[in-house]
Amino acid sequence: MKLSNSFSGALRTFSYFMASGSHYNLEGIDYLSLYGDEPSAIEQVFAIYANVIEMDEEGNVLNARYADIRATDYLKQYCDPNFIVEPPYEDWEVALY
């Protein structure tokens, strides 16, 4: 089974804004250097995104913005120890497969 166009589009959009340094939820946070210096932080962001995103039976993405926020909040917390993710992550959200 192939990934749906809806998911492919959501992932492409998320990836673009993460790679360009212009993600709306990370304004003011310099995270691009993490790609070369601390790739495990970026890996965790994409794992959270993949774990949180939901699709219906036809493959239509139901919560792209929520998945964006949950994923990028990890990076906010990583870069700013004063930022607290609410609600705290559950184990299934941060699992690496």
Image: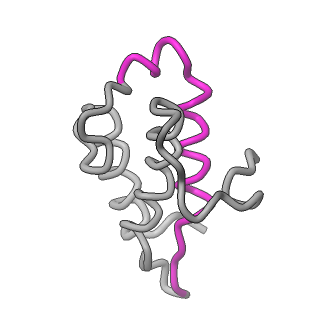
Instruction: Look at 43% across and 67% down and name the residue there.
Output: 66
Instruction: Say left or right for 28 vs 74.
Output: left
- Is the magenta region chiefly helix, strand or loop? helix
Q: Looking at the picture, how far across and down is residue 72, in whole percent?
A: 44, 47
Is residue 50 covered in magenta?
A: yes
Instruction: Look at 53% across and 44% down and name the residue there.
Output: 74
Instruction: Look at 49% across and 85% down and name the residue there.
Output: 58
Instruction: Say left or right for 39 vs 25.
Output: right
Which residue extends farthest front? 82
Q: Nearer the viewer, residue 45 or 16?
A: 45
Label tally = 0
Is residue 35 covered in magenta?
A: yes
Q: Nearer the viewer, residue 63 or 70?
A: 70
**Residue range (magenta):** 32-56
58 in relation to 51, above or below? below
Q: Looking at the picture, how far across and down is residue 77, in whole percent?
A: 51, 40
Q: Specify the quadrant that holds the N terminus.
A: bottom right
